[in-house]
Amino acid sequence: MRVEIWSDIACPWCYVGKARFEKALQAFPHRDDVEVVHRSFELDPHRAKGDVESVLTMLTRKYGMSEAQARAGEDNLGTQAAAEGLQYRTTGRDHGNTFDMHRLLHLAKEQGRQDELIQILYRANFAEERSVFTEGDERLVELAVEAGLDAEDVRKVLADPTAYAEAVRADEREAAELGANGVPFFVLDRAYGVSGAQPAEVFAQALTQAWGERSPLKLIEQGDADACGPDGCAVPQR
Amino acid sequence: MRVEIWSDIACPWCYVGKARFEKALQAFPHRDDVEVVHRSFELDPHRAKGDVESVLTMLTRKYGMSEAQARAGEDNLGTQAAAEGLQYRTTGRDHGNTFDMHRLLHLAKEQGRQDELIQILYRANFAEERSVFTEGDERLVELAVEAGLDAEDVRKVLADPTAYAEAVRADEREAAELGANGVPFFVLDRAYGVSGAQPAEVFAQALTQAWGERSPLKLIEQGDADACGPDGCAVPQR
């Protein structure tokens, strides 16, 4: 079974939701048969690279919250994160464009390091005082190397804005096609969707349901195709 | 859409079938949205590593063919391969255990080189006089390096028989669960199956049908989950 998770590094509920999903996955009897793939979704795709502001300013300016509302929202996120065993800085975080991070996540996918990288990016952004926005490319190189990527590979991708750009856009188009208008968005075997940082119990139910309802394949052209089996080649199939 | 192809390096119809599938894929309008994954299937899993014999001997001994039948089968394969623009040596090929090659294909998958490697292994086995069975590990290192893998990574995997062994076994279990008793076996979005080296037209039909019938996601728990969208975080979803 395959679970695809659309998310953004700048999305606190993606950080919390991933932990809740993983709690359910750890307890799932067929966990070794579940492959997890991260898909790109930018919350703020039109923001220029390097255009960085504090989360508080962004919340009050962009979403019209009062400062008290914005602070209460961050405090709530801190509480929810703590309940999942996650650190979350409720003040002092910043916000910016995440396109380059998504491009690097596609590089990391090719090298089997995608989950490591997204976890390190989340931690840097939400838990640590290591801005993923203000330190330029070298911070991303540093974090990607921690995830096991090669520094030169990473610099090459960062220096070429077309590298993996189409892969990011394709993920975003796919999210829209699947009806996701926010993240995190979880898709199980392209059959079931779970929207938002639901409780672990909901993910557990989704995993069980999707696993139980995997439908038998519909065979196209069941004729005597040329194939090889235990009894030699060109045996009739099924 | 995702297409998984179960196959074995020692399976001539897999070599031919892959070319037929690719012809259909190249002409498929949504080809850029199709991801191809290779899955492991060993035709001869109980054969010891290093136990190599000629294809002709294997066909007559294991499958009880007459030498004339075996030669006619190879000639037919040569003709079918040529029709797909593939070279195929109808005499002089050998046969052995392919477990290590499948382990390397899983290493290659992690590095985004799986399709390159399987193509190079097929060519070495079916088209070129470069046995994948008799030259020991160094032939596999040489071929994997041609596919873009690092020689040291490859040697490490070959030296450790447990590396990716479980990944190979998991693919084989999954093939059995899906009802595949021979290869090549193509699975489209876990919804449609195509067994054998069918004509390109059958693959074209399968791609079109699977694409057209992608079903909308069933949403589990549609409540007001915590999520982030274009209008900020913690907005009700859908």
Image (spheres, coloured by chain):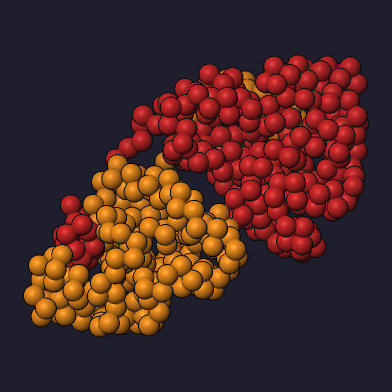
Chain colours: A red, B orange
x, y percent for residue B13:
28, 68
| Horizontal relation, residue B142 to residue B7: left or right | right
Q: Residue at x 54, y 62 (%)?
A: B155
x, y percent for residue B41:
33, 55
x, y percent for residue A106:
65, 53
**What quarter of the picture does the C terminus of chain B occupy?**
top right
**Is residue B10 in view from this perspective?**
yes
Front residue of A139/A176: it is A139
| Horizontal relation, residue B144 to residue B20: left or right | right
Q: Is residue A182 above or below residue B153?
A: above
Front residue of B216/B141: it is B141
Q: Is residue B108 above or below residue A38?
A: below
Q: Which residue is drawn at 61% across and 54% down?
A: A111
Q: Which quarter of the picture shows residue A232?
A: bottom left
Q: In this view, does A221 lie above or below A57?
A: below
Q: Which residue is drawn at 43% across and 27% down?
A: A29
x, y percent for residue B64:
9, 67
Q: In this view, does A32 lie above or below A142?
A: above
Front residue of B227/A31: it is A31
Q: Which quarter of the picture shows residue A181?
A: top right
**Is residue A8 in view from this perspective?**
no
Number of callouts: 0
Front residue of B112/A70: it is B112
| Horizontal relation, residue B141 to residue A114: left or right | left
Q: Which residue is drawn at 40% across and 50% down?
A: B168
